[in-house]
Image (cartoon, rainbow, N blue to C red):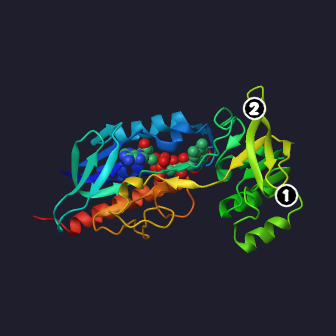
Amino acid sequence: TFEVLVIGGGPAGASAAIYAARKGISTGIAAERFGGQVADTMGIENLISVPYTEGPKLVAAMEQHVKEYDVDIMNMQRAEKLIPASRPGMPHEIRLENGATLKARSLVLSTGARWRQIGVPGEAEYRNKGVAYCPHCDGPLFKGKRVAVIGGGNSGVEAAIDLAGIVGHVTLIEFGAEMRADDVLQKKLRSLKNVEVITSGQTTEITGENGKVNGLNYTDRTSGEQHHISLEGVFVQIGLVPNTEWLKGDIELSQHGEIIVNDRNETSIPGVFAAGDATTVPYKQIVISMGEGSKAALSAFDFLIRNSVD
Ligand code: FAD
């Protein structure tokens, strides 16, 4: 039985494991793929004190840091069910896809999230070569250039407003007849001179040349006409999906499927904590996930010293 078992090996999980192990308590970390979204990232320029690094390099550094401590790393293990303690003092159980069960007196859930993709030709091919998902991360790479934002919900409109201050021109493409973002955001967006909004637009392809995005094709869903826009970047903003399907019914989730946490990273189950992109924490970033992971581990430690059985 672990004292702290961390599920997920992204920045939140790695940070939680290090903080827990530094308290001298038995710590395990089970992850489907150590590194998480960071493993899919190219340049990272907003990890404070590290002006520039790359995803795989940061993953290697995180793993090396975790290995400085006595942490049981179980990589390539997918959790499929959480069985909460039957009564206080009993361990929680995590059932893995391979059939094994892990037991722990406290848990930190940090299974992260994934960006919803539009699934058109060119999206996967030009990922990190003009196709981006995170305006806070990649916006500055498109300084002075032309970009499109796909999606007119709150995150798409916020991204377009944010990008308009950095890039040369923004075209926002909304699939529906109207944007779905809050009125105040739509008003702000429409006041910006370098933004064009296209509604009833279905993106059909992201085009490129020499390994880089050079435009996109869309269909006007009202007239059926096809159009091409020349640009250098496409930000896909049609939703961030938390990896919490496996927790449904066992723990309280928000309407978006995020694990509901308070400012101490407590969930609806005593002794079960959560951190990072899988939770309701506002803003999903590496530095935030690391901070949240450390908070969750400290809360778990606090829980353990207050609920020791001996
Ligand atoms: P994740 O990184 O998503 O890690 C989740 C972990 O949980 C993984 O180990 C995964 O394998 C595991 N997991 C999932 N489900 C299960 C399961 N059922 N059982 C076991 N394990 C499971 N942020 C920045 O700050 N700066 C950037 O420049 C930046 N660029 C980005 C570029 C891209 C392309 C992407 C996709 C994201 C970027 N982000 C960036 C966002 C950043 O990567 C995330 O905010 C951060 O990785 C979240 O950390 P996390 O630990 O919460 O989750």
Is 153 placed above or below 167 here? below
Task: Classify the position of the C terminus by image quarter.
Answer: bottom left
Give the spatial CA distance, label 2 vs label 1: 23 Å
Residue 158 in sight in this render: yes
Give the image location of residue 121, x and y in percent.
69, 35
- Three-letter amino acid code at the position of disc 2: Lys
Q: Earlier along the polypeptide chain: callout 2 or callout 1?
A: 1
- Give the image location of residue 225, x and y in percent: 85, 46
Q: Which percent across, then down, holds residue 23?
A: 28, 54
Disc 2: which residue: 212
Classify mark 2: residues with Cα within 10 Å, few (<14), some (14-19) or many (20+). Answer: some
Query: Residue 122: which quarter of the image?
Result: top right
Q: What residue is disc 1 on?
A: 195
Three-letter residue code for mark 1: Val
Residue furthest to the right in view is: 193
Q: Secondary structure at mark 2?
A: strand
- Identify the residue shown where x is 84% and y is 43%: 226
Relative to 226, does residue 172 appear above or below in the rendering? below
Classed neighbour count for the residue bearing mark 1: other residues with Cα under 10 Å, few (<14), some (14–19), many (≥20): many
Task: Name which residue lies at 69% across and 41% down.
Answer: 131
Query: What is the quadrant of residue 77 in the picture?
Result: top left
Q: Which mark is residue 307?
A: none
User: x%, y% of residue 107?
Assistant: 30, 57
Q: Secondary structure at mark 1?
A: strand
| Depth order, front residue of 278/50 | 278
Residue farthest to the bottom, as pictured: 184
State the residue at coordinates (82%, 52%): 171
Residue lying farthest to the left in this orientation: 310
- The yes-or-no answer for disc 1 within 8 Å of ligand 1 is no
